[in-house]
Amino acid sequence: MGKFSPTTRKGDCEEIANPSTAYGRRQRNWIDAHGSVPDGQVVDASCENRHCIALWHAYLRPRVEQPGKYRKIADRVHRLKVGQHFDVAGVGTDERSRNRFRSGLYAAARLDRVSVRGLPDGSVRIMKVGVWGSANT
């Protein structure tokens, strides 16, 4: 069982040691005081202190998504013509890592139909085989 994280006062802020725990605690404090957090929003601290959990510093801001590797690869697939391909190195030769890569790419490249084939050297070949919802697949 995890230990309770104690809070300390630092100026006007109420701080907690772990920023990840502070994020969750800020969110829980907001929900208790104001209700649910809208989709696409996160609870942040106006004092810009990542450790602050004080409700009087809490405010809603838009969620900022970080571009991941699958999104970058999906954008590259989207620029291809049907039948073209490219290789991505360093995926791995074991089935688990290739399945994980394949699932991430399929989720990111929702509009394009792609084929992912493993190569013996640990890389994968990604081929655009069509576009979803199109008659010319």
Image (cartoon, grey):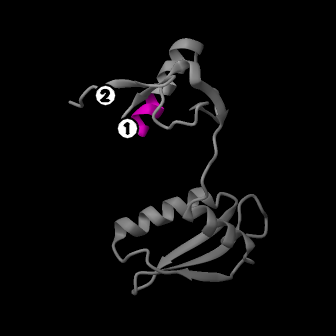
Q: Position of residue 109 (x, y in %)?
A: 64, 61
Name which quarter of the figure residue 44 lies in. Answer: top right
36 horizontally vs 9: left or right? right
23 magenta-colored? yes
Look at the image and give the residue range highlighted in magenta: 19-24
Q: Residues within 10 Å of mark 1 (few under 14, many from 20)?
A: few
- On the image, numbered disc 2 is attached to which residue? 5
What residue appears at the point 42 percent right and 28 percent down from the top-left corner?
15
Callout 1 secondary element: loop
Q: Position of residue 30 (x, y in %)?
A: 54, 20
Q: Which label sits on residue 28?
A: none
Q: Is residue 33 above or below residue 109?
A: above
Q: Amino acid at mark 2?
A: Ser
Q: Are circles 1 and 2 on residues that touch, CB within 8 Å?
A: yes
Q: Is residue 111 above or below residue 125?
A: above
What residue appears at the point 50 percent right and 60 percent down from the top-left corner?
103
The Cα–Cα distance between marks 1 and 2, rounded to whole angstroms, is 8 Å
- On the image, numbered disc 1 is attached to which residue? 18
The furthest residue to the front: 11
Q: Position of residue 126 (x, y in %)?
A: 57, 76
Callout 2 secondary element: loop
Q: Amino acid at mark 1?
A: Asn
The furthest residue to the right: 135
